[in-house]
Amino acid sequence: MPEVSGVDRDYNLWVLLHQVSDIIFNAREAELQEHGLPATQAEVLFVIKAIGDKVTPAQISRMMFRRPHSVSGIIERMKKAGLVKKTKDLHRKNLVRVTMTEKGQQAYKQALKRKSVQKIMSALSEAERQKLKSLLETLRNKGLKELRIDPKKAPPPKFV
């Protein structure tokens, strides 16, 4: 059997990490589908709640580590669904603020139920969870540095 290089091991580990992320995302998506809320929209609601009302699309984009045009598309779909509203900033006319509507608040409350994530994470002991958290924080910080983002200035990994 051929020997696997360090680069291949790293790539295979990244693929596994990506698969796990996608699997958990898909389980979460299926859970939220019962409420008609895509997981990406739930994530935007969590960001709005974390940052506070009158958040800008740019702030949401930075917090989610997504491209601004992707977040703008998500926000537009949420606006059409009545989950958020967009208003022009009174002091800076070229700035848009995003706030949650009453319907958005209700969707946020439904999204707080995260049984799928809890079920999957229950495969780990508390010690394993702490170790995984530490390892993921190490990778997150190294990745942020690779992107020339100061980890101390990066958005926190907590939304709730």
Image (cartoon, rainbow, N blue to C red):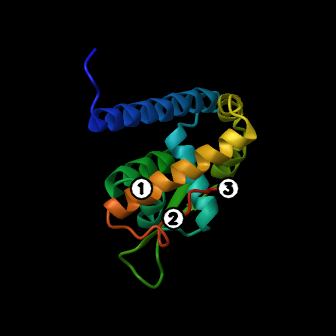
Of residue 142 and residue 7, the one placed in the foreground of this image is 7
Say what amino acid the circle numbered 3 marks: Val
How far apart marks 1 and 3 lie (CA) works out to: 17 Å
Residue sitting nearer the eye, 157 or 63: 157
Q: If the image is split into quadrants, where does the C terminus sit?
A: bottom right
Crowdedness near tag 3: few (<14), some (14–19) or many (≥20) residues, C-alpha within 10 Å: few
Q: In the rendered image, which residue does mark 3 sit on?
A: 160
Whole-percent x and y of residue 80?
A: 48, 46
Q: Earlier in the sequence, mark 1 or mark 3?
A: 1
Residue 48 position by quadrant? bottom right
Which comes sooner in the sequence, label 1 or label 2? 1
Disc 2 is placed on an element classified as loop
Q: Is residue 68 above or below residue 80?
A: below
Residue under label 1, please give it.
65
The percent position of residue 1, horizontal first and vertical second, equals 28, 14
Q: Pick the residue in front: 131 or 14.
A: 131
Name which residue type carries label 2: Pro
Residue at disc 3, secondary structure? loop
- Check contact, mark 1 vs mark 2: CB within 8 A: yes
x and y, in percent, of residue 24 in the image: 55, 32
Q: CA distance from mark 1 to mark 2?
A: 9 Å
Q: Badge 1: few (under 14), some or many (20 or more) residues near its Cα, within 10 Å?
A: few
State the residue position of label 2: 155
Amino acid at circle 1: Phe
Q: Quadrant of residue 129?
A: top right
For the point 48% across and 81% down, the residue is: 90
Q: Is residue 81 visible?
A: no
Instruction: Left or right? Give the position of 13 relative to 35.
Output: left
The residue located at (38%, 56%) in the rendering is 143
- Mark 1 lies on a secondary structure that is loop
Circle 2 Cα neighbour tier, 10 Å, few/some/many (<14 / 14–19 / ≥20): some
In this picture, residue 40 sits left or right of residue 122: left
